[in-house]
Image (cartoon, coloured by chain):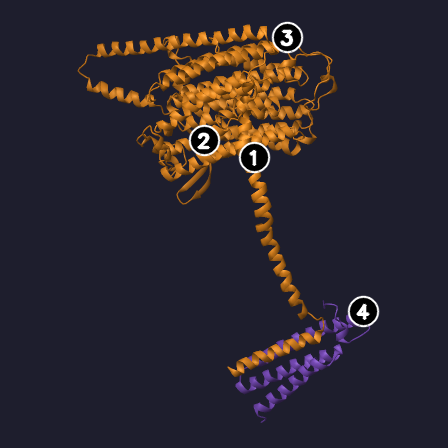
Chain colours: A purple, B orange
Amino acid sequence: MVPLSWYLALSALLFTIGAVGVFIKRNAITIFLCIELMLNAVNLTFVALSGFFGDVGGQLFVFIVMTVAAAEAAVGLAIIISIFRNRESLNVDDVDAMKL
Amino acid sequence: MKYPLATIILAPLIGAAILGLFGKRMSERVIGWIACSTVAVSSILAFYLFFNHASTLEQGDKHYEYLFTWINVGSFRADASLMLDSLSAIYILFITFVGFWIHVFATGYMRGDTGYWRFFAYMNIFMFSMLTLVLADNFLLMFVGWEGVGLCSYLLIGYYFQKDFANDAAKKAFIVNRIGDLGFALGVMLLFTKAGTIFYFDDPARGIHGAFNWAMAQTADPLALSAIFAGGITTIAVLLFVGAIGKSAQLPLYVWLPDAMAGPTPVSALIHAATMVTAGVYMVSRASSIYIHAPTAMFIIAIVGAATALFAATIGLAQWDIKKVLAYSTISQLGYMFLACGVGAFGAGIFHVFTHAFFKALLFLGSGSVIVGMHHEQDMRKMGGLKKYMPLTYATMLVGWLAISGVPLLSGFFSKDEILYRSFVAEGLPDSWAKILWFVGAITALVTAVYMTRLMVLTFWGAERFKASEPVLEAHSTPAEHHAGPPRESPRSMVLPLIVLAAGAVFAGYLGVPEGLSGGKLPNYFERLLEPSIASSEVMKIKEAARAQRARDEESDVRVLTRQATETGDAHALERTLTGVSIVFALAGIGIGWVWFNRKPLWEPPRLLEEKYYVDEVYDAALVQPIKQGSINVLWKFIDVHVIDGAVNGAGHLASLLGTGLRYLQSGLARSYVAVLVFGALLLIAYFVIR
């Protein structure tokens, strides 16, 4: 039986990797993957705590998160493709038309 | 028919809606038919109702027609409900009858005008508003009609809106009327706080209490100046009268009426002579049960009425514009009506309203016929000798002239005489005021006869002072053939109303022959009809007499009867004497006018009179200019520019300053947003952890 703390530590590690990735990477696809990583880190926490407390609600939440993630992936990838078509670049720093 | 009264007021409104929405594409013929037929419907219904209910109206029956509850808030209630009693019945009779014939006249007078449909739409709305005013059963609905007629008056005075003078006159009428309306509104509000209701009379069917029933239960205020400011029944009466001053053009708010002649002549006849301006008299008579408890207000009304009558008549003596003469004459006659109300003879006042509607509408339409015949010339200096060219107009104007001058056996004679007699015998006035009021009224009758004779002499008799080929000023676009040639008689649609109204001017007076003149043989039908609708101090006197009689029961019946007979006989003798005096005054006036103006038709009247006592100039200097300068220098150049604009611009400046600071947050770089987001999240977490 793996203790709860291990799950949480792994989850924290995955979340940090994701967050740092969003921070330092400039490639839109990479950032996108890092976001997915953060979502799944949270999912891991939900499942672990659900097992620990014997409460099925956490697992239910995971399904919702996964559904949302799938929808978000579809929309996000579409946006990225359309940005690439317009700018011939995936560097998010090039997409700064909103600045003053 | 279930809603006859509603039909009476709505028929002209429907006509106005049709003309206003679709009139532009209709031919003049169709427009004229629609406008006249809707008023004809009202008129026929009014006559039908009157003859069906005359006997019950005489006994004081009131026919209510409840449409819907308009406002019901707390203890305040106002219904859209109509009431027919003898007073409103008389009013709707002559409003719709005279109104109909003026509509017919206008179809001829306005021929060829580009705004034909607009004109008749306004005229129909006016009929609707006036009938609402008269048929309402509470003060608020009356106020709707009151403001409605004011609006129509404004629209029709400013009918030739391309011309500056018409616009100025329209605005003047509207603004001056606002002053009066303020008094009226305040009066109604005070009445509501005192009586708790704005309905006229009790109506148990709807559970309504009437303000007049409240007033009748009050004790009369004393005759004292302080009563005006006491906030009681006298204050209500005075405030309501301020409204009447504005609407009925009395001193000092009469200045709008002469200028209102800028409108087309049928408008002057309908609105500014026969109907709308008598709304003030109607309101005062309607509220007679309030006024008889406010002797101070009555005294003020009598003085204002008498002063206006004489003042306006003297101005009328010196005007050159034919319509201006008639306008001042209207103001003067309205003064007579208020004089009657002020001395407690409300019935006589309404009787004069009734007869005046006929002969003044006749005179105005006659002048309109003259103006059209003269190719839109209004200056009497350029007329003269017209009887040869316009025989029918001349004949009918002759009737109007004799009627207004007070020549015996015509309508104006009976009503004016009744007013003069009643002011002579008025009671409750201090000192010898009754005699003074009578004397002013009698002098006014003389002056009236003089200026009306002057009008006739300058227009129809004497030498021709116009040149037939002279090019004349166009007042509005009429077919080309109207612009040249000698004066000509007007078309049939204009002459027929003149004849009908002339008949009215002759015979309307016989409905109310004063008792003294007929020796009690002819019943004064008019007064008997009005009696239940009008609270008169006479009623109280009769009650008191009855009480005194009961106390003298031991006195033999025969002796009482003989004494009463001698008393009434004395009163009749006095009335006949006074009548003789006023006949002498009227004939003297006509004689003076005849001799003087036949000899010197272009006699220059004193400048003071010709310039209307410089009242307009005084108002301009005392009121208009200070307000104008104050508005420009204080309100505009200081308050508007500095205070209001300053606040508005300051708010704008503040927003733009804030924005300049905040816009540095938006870098456009997605990763900087993420950084802010993460640091924010970390800060929140830190806050919760540390706490």
Q: Amino acid at mark 3?
A: Gly
- How many residues crowd around disc 2 within 10 Å: few (fewer than 14), some, or many (20 or more)? many
What amino acid type is highlighted by mark number 1? Gln
Image x and y of residue B312, in percent: 50, 20
Taking depth in this image into account, of A35 and B607 the one nearest to the observer is B607
Mark 3–mark 4 distance (CA, rounded to whole Å): 94 Å
Q: Tell me whether marks 2 and 1 sit on the same chain.
A: yes
Residue behind mark 3: B385
The amino acid type of the residue labelled 2 equals Val
**What residue did someone put label 2 on?**
B242
Rendered image: mark on residue B625: 1
Q: N-terminal of the two: label 1 or label 3?
A: 3
Residue B455 at x, y = what percent?
57, 13
Left or right of B559 on screen, residue B632: right
Q: CA distance from mark 2 to mark 1?
A: 24 Å
Classify residue B459 by image quadrant: top right
Front disc: 1 or 3: 1
